[in-house]
Image (cartoon, rainbow, N blue to C red):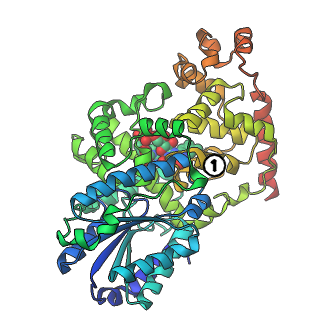
Amino acid sequence: PRPLEVLNRTLEETKLQRQSVAVGEAVVHWFKRDLRTFDNRALSMASAKAKSKGVPLICMFIVSPQDYQAHLTSAPRVDFELRTLEVMKEDLAEKDIPLYVTTIEERKNVIPHIMQKCEEWNAKHIYCNIEYEVDELRRESKLVKKCLDQGISFTAVHDDVVVPPETLVTGAGKQYSVYSPWFRAWIKHIHEHPHLLDAFPPPTPNPPTARQLFEPIFASPLPTTPPNKSLTIEERNRFASLWPAGEHEAHSRLTRFLHEKVGKYKETRNFPAHNSTGLLSVHFSSGTLAARTAIRSARDINSTKKLDGGNLGITGWISELAWRDFYKHVLAHWPYVCMHKPFKYEYTDIEWEYDDAKFEAWCEGRTGYPIVDAAMRQLNYMGYMHNRCRMIVASFLAKDLLTDWRRGERYFMEHLIDGDFASNNGGWGFSASTGVDPQPYFRIFNPLLQSEKFDEGGEYIRKWIPELAGVVGTAIHDPYGRGAGKVAEKAGYPRPIVDHKMARERALARYKEGLGRS
Ligand code: FAD
């Protein structure tokens, strides 16, 4: 059985037993990747439970360096989380709700620590939102039982996605693996169950006595960044100014985007120089903004008050956000994608090139393909890359360099501030033609044509590759091929590390051979 099935079953089987647990002296909400107080399902449930029983709510967050290592969480992302916790600690304190944050070095000690704290606080109810990665689902299933053995009720609920995984099935009762029919089913389901987009109320204040009771938690500073994820001061300042943290920032970004940009989103979203997308992915992936909140807000400004019809920009944006749900449904249904396996089994046996020098050139933005290099430099500087460029560089790595796409997937997770396993794995699978709903392997992006089409005037390239700032006209897309070689060479910009035409033929042959073998 799939780990999500096991967790759902465990929760169902223990429902009555969990409900009958006496309340104790506190209720705990365990924050994970849901770092917000507004529209947070588990937090709202924990708060309601605490209020109904007249006991305080305590929030907790565990900094787990081993989990960061296992999930390849990037240092900017960890820094973003810690900055968010600072904001949350203050917000919660205004409601007399303590936020307990501590570092637990070894993964295996996280659960015992939570149990020990519950004992100390005499808390008998723990709430959290479900994460869909295999390890997390398995951990939660164990925790439900372990907690019950100790007289504690542990409740995990769906919150990260608008429609819970395993809800939408094809006419034949199967999980969808193609986005378009899945998307139609997703819209239909939400229109039939509009409560799925309702907001969960923020936590109500604790009784003022909670202040004295938990004074040491209110007074304690947040832990410092774990050494395996530390940033230099210069980097920290840069990420703090590029990506201010916390849910207030997320809400003001959302409001600005919906007022100023979403209307033109459909026409502009593919052009990386236009700054026309929401830039909210870091907020969705760390949970400072719920996808539900964003979709509801977009729906409410649509003339139809629905997820379809009306303004094309709004519905286009909603359909992009739906990809997020789609990939989490895929992950929950086919958990093996979490285990370094391609979704399409027949693509297991492609013979990859293992050329470290070329891989490093790709990582550092030195491939000699300006659009690829601009994008990789954007990633390395901002912890973010525009969606069109993510597709271009992923295709370039897997097809032109014939490098195992999992190396790129890993590099992305280690550098993205918005790294999200399901979306990243889905995006790489799509681009390398090994995933759900992929582009067929014989459709190979031509980086030059992509560059001309989506960065026509070369603004994006010039912004990220200062060496090419002096190159004029269309030579910006291919300086060595279009008469600007001297300028590029003088500025130290590399020649192309691979010939696209040759690389295309090679990729076609290798993919075909790989398919033939399996
Ligand atoms: P907008 O255009 O404003 O879109 C709104 C939101 O919709 C995004 O914030 C995101 O949550 C969601 N979304 C949009 N496109 C996609 C998509 N293709 N797949 C899933 N969700 C989507 N997104 C991540 O959040 N984390 C990742 O680790 C990640 N890795 C990717 C890797 C590859 C190879 C590719 C091709 C795409 C990846 N994406 C990932 C999806 C997408 O590129 C980003 O979500 C998007 O660029 C974020 O910018 P934005 O917030 O301005 O997006």
| Place of residue 17 in the rendered image (x, y in percent of width and height, measured from the top left) | 35, 90
Q: Is the C-beta of the residue carrying label 1 under 8 Å from the nearest atom of ligand 1? A: yes
**Residue 200 at least partly seen:** yes
Q: Which residue is mark 1?
A: 409
The residue lying toward the viewer, choosing from 77 and 360, is 77
The residue lying toward the viewer, choosing from 330 and 422, is 422
**Residue 199 at least partly seen:** no
User: Going by the image, does 174 lie left or right of 308?
Assistant: right
| Place of residue 113 in the rendered image (x, y in percent of width and height, measured from the top left) | 48, 76
Quarter occupied by residue 447: top right
Quadrant into which the N terminus falls? bottom right
How many badges with numbers are in the image?
1
Residue at (41, 49) in percent of width and height: 83
Circle 1: is it few (<14), some (14-19), or many (20+) Cα within 10 Å? many
The residue lying toward the viewer, choosing from 300 and 199, is 199
Residue at (78, 56) in percent of width and height: 349
Q: Secondary structure at mark 1?
A: helix
| Place of residue 212 in the rendered image (x, y in percent of width and height, measured from the top left) | 23, 71
| Place of residue 253 in the rendered image (x, y in percent of width and height, measured from the top left) | 32, 39
488 vs 74: above or below: above
Quadrant into which the C terminus falls? bottom right
191 vs 136: above or below: above
Amino acid at circle 1:
Glu
36 vs 317: above or below: below
